[in-house]
Image: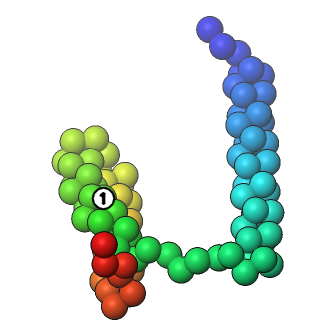
Amino acid sequence: MIELSEWILISILIVSAMVIIGLILTLVLLKKKKEGKMGEPNYQVFFILGILWMPIGIIFMMTINLVLGIAFLGLGVSYLGIGLANRDKWKIQ
């Protein structure tokens, strides 16, 4: 059985890896912004993700965990709202 000190070490490693990844992503985004290569987001993808996350949230609410399902449902509604609010900026393919 894993002792408590091993769990603490594993948690510290995971958190430090997440911090390092976050710093690297921040530096990459700042570099792109400085160079002027930042593009506009594809709002149609937000709409599609919203449509996908809403049923996942409902299924999670009924089967796994009510709170987790509400979180996924809220994420889906948020993404759907972002996509619909910027419908005029969708990239027609």
Residue drawn at x 74%, y 20% as measured from the top left: 6
Give the x, y percent position of residue 67.
Answer: 35, 54
Q: Which of 11 and 90 is in front in this view?
A: 90
Classify 10 Å Cα crowding around label 1: few (below 14), some (14-19), many (20 and above): many
In the rendered image, which quarter is residue 25 located in?
bottom right
Where's the C terminus, which quadrant?
bottom left
Across and down, in percent, residue 68 comes to 37, 52
Disc 1 marks a residue whose amino acid type is: Trp
Instruction: Give the position of the N terminus as an image quadrant.
Output: top right
Does residue 66 appear to the left or right of 22 in the view shown? left
Q: In front here: 20 or 72? A: 20
Residue 54 screen position, x and y as percent:
25, 62
Colour setting: rainbow
Name the outermost residue toward the top. Answer: 1
In the displayed image of the protein, which residue is found farthest to the bottom? 88
> Where is 35 relative to 85, above or below?
above
Helix, strand or loop at mark 1: helix
Q: Residue at image x 75%, y 41%?
A: 17
Q: Is residue 32 visible?
A: yes
The residue under label 1 is 53
